[in-house]
Amino acid sequence: MIHPVRRALAVAASRAPRLLQTASRTTSVRSVRAAAAGSYYSTTSRRLQDAFPSQLENMASSTLPKVVPAVPQTLTEKIVQRYSVGLAPGKKVKSGDYVTLQPHHCMTHDNSWPVAMKFMSIGASKIHDNRQVVMTLDHDVQNKSEANLKKYRQIEEFAKTHGVDFYPAGRGIGHQIMVEEGYAWPGTVTVASDSHSNMYGGVGCLGTPMVRTDAASIWATGKTWWQIPPIAKVTFTGLLPPGVTGKDVIVALCGLFNNDDVLNHAIEFTGSEETMRSIPVDDRLTIANMTTEWGALSGLFPIDNVLASWLRAKATVNAMEHPELGDKAKFTHAKIDELLENPLVADPGATYAKQLYLNLSTLAPFVAGPNSVKIATPLKDLEAQNLKLDKAYLVSCTNSRASDIAAAARVFKDAAADNNGVIPKVADGVKFYIAAASLLEQKQAEESGDWQVLLDAGAEPLPSGCGPCIGLGTGLLEPGEIGISASNRNFKGRMGSTDAKAYLASPEVVAASALKGKIAGPGYYQKPEGVEKVIIGEGNGVHEQDKAMSIEDALDKIIAEAESLIAAAEAESSSSSSTSTPSSTSEGEETLTEILPGFPSSISGEIIFCDADNINTDGIYPGKYTYQDNITPSKMAEVCMENYDPSFGSIAQPGDILVTGFNFGCGSSREQAATAILAKKIPLVVSGSFGNIFSRNSINNALMGVEVPKLVQRLREEFGGGGEKALTRRTGWKLTWDVRRSKVVVEEGEGGKKWEQKVGELPPNVQEIIARGGLEKWVKSQIEA
């Protein structure tokens, strides 16, 4: 055991960067500037099989251009380049490319046993690379039922058999373990079967979620497929003022850019060296974690001096606590030297799908809710409403590290000064729950005394794990209650009753609210002189640069775009000449999609309309059922859409086509959101847009989906009149999806108006996965072939 004084020095070293950054904020400037034709008919050739590479086979190099000009890449593209396999010589990956990805690490949690069942069902018997896989138990750790304990034993035994790194229940939340144990290493791709894998971006690691079936594929082959998303650059300017945290940054981003601005994008955060110094790594982890709620697939911070200081501190602590590990330790100064020797950065002239900015100097504390991250309200406005509080939570991988616990403890310590030095209790009628992100973070908080301060104040400790954040275990919200949490997600019904109201805020605000019995802050924030509103916008926030790019950058961008177009044209020409058959097509014709034997050429049914945007996975399939592995298909059908509309089950009928608004299926990575709809015998979901992870789950589980924004608009025009809006409505309208012609035909009621709309093509390789009954069965067929 390391000597307490020695450990205290090591802990101080790890905190030093944050302390220095906090001190530097007080010198920030208080005055800020005000912001101001014909289509073509031809049969699709078999090369569409390569719309994305298979999960087991590398893309054939013959289908790629022989020479690809070098083009500037974003940081995301550079990292993906390193972890893509089967690329043609000289190929530079770019946004939109489908790649075969071989991630550095893949983490699974309580869903490890369902993944293992899939793994075994496809005929696999040995994990391809056991150093690639990490298993953690974190979601349902309070559940001591024999069924859950049996599952946990099965996971542990499976991990031991295959030599996989395993972390038992109570050790910590998987995402925190991935960061603190060095699995999520800067400049790598690391995935997990959980939607908050984005968090790894806080340490410069490209983290993105996979689903259970993908995880099984990675276990079996070391690889899976991924399409590089459109990439958005978010530039921070200014400095974080005292009293404003990373949580306020991401809550503001979710609430102020709330029109799906970054939906299904990969985000890269950037800013000047001075600006980025004001955002410590713990705050970066919080921001990256909640890019999931913002709708993004990743949230990547740069590999910079702030990260380097954090890594150095970790290496120092490791060397002091475990000198026997030497160069085998996860964090070593030699490994950091290697990383920093040639750190990955985005190229000048790299192409971004969009650019946004936020002036941190103009930011104040914000609160998200109720029951939505898209509603962000300045704390001062909610304080004026005197919202009585029932429960407060300092839990989750988002904001329950030692620094967060210290921030919450400070609120009570400061209040003790007016209470004769005695730590005051939380307000009468309020329950305050705390759970550290990991056992290591809890031990650090205990050694500093911060954990005890919260216990003295009356906080109720929970084991390190997801717990209330996922709606499991002690302390869930009851009907009519109001809760405030430092966690990441406040969807209706997620943390308890659908009749409760849940808000999200920083640890300081959560602690102050628990102390005062209403949503309130600790009073640390003082509005800087001249700040009247949060300054946000499109561009990078620097007026001169937003007005006109430099000639050099403009030329770089033009050349890059031209080279990309030339490469694409050459690839099309080369591929067409080698794989296409002669055709006598002419203008006015349209492309016909090849239909594989056994796949339906069209799908028809009556439209059932759920008129809401952002219907999340908790709304589709309640979290309380997610980790019950013995749920039958009939029960899944019964509870499908229960949190969105309890009457859905009695209205929807087998064979219906479900139509919803925009961003359907946002939220968690649970596959049951797709399989519950299938259990309801609904073969097709149509929406204005889908959350990416739901789309992935749909393909992997053989649920078909298509985006038709015009249909959503027409339904709202027809049924969105006066009176109370029906959550679920039988419309009497009929939809037919003509897969071969890539269009939908809508009949607006019997004998009503008919119209059609072109939609995205369903390539043969996706057809094959769906026709096989999903990716799991497809992989099995490939193994057996």
Image (spheres, rainbow, N blue to C red):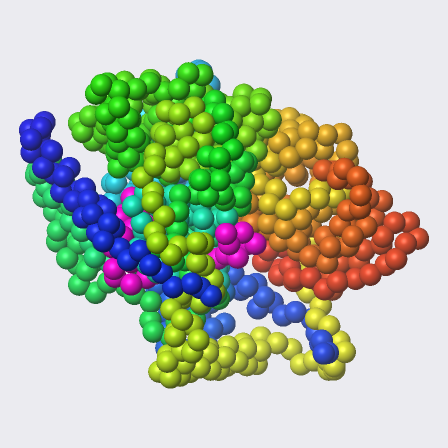
Above or below 453: residue 98: below
Residue nearest the observer in this picture, 247 or 333: 247
Tell whether 363 sits left or right of 482. Answer: left
In the image, residue 20 lies at what x, y percent? 18, 48
Above or below 616: residue 639: above
In the image, residue 32 lies at what x, y percent? 36, 60
Magenta segment, which residues?
Answer: 256-285
Above or below 43: residue 401: above
Tell whether 691 sits left or right of 590. Answer: left
Would you identify the image quadrant in which residue 646 lies?
A: top right
In the image, residue 440 lies at what x, y percent? 23, 31
Q: Is residue 140 magenta?
A: no
Taking the spot 43% from the left edge, 20% from the top edge, the residue there is: 430
Tell whether 715 sits left or right of 188. Answer: right
Taking the spot 42% from the left edge, 78% from the top edge, the residue there is: 548
In the image, residue 28 lies at what x, y percent? 26, 55
Q: Does the magenta stretch include residue 262?
A: yes
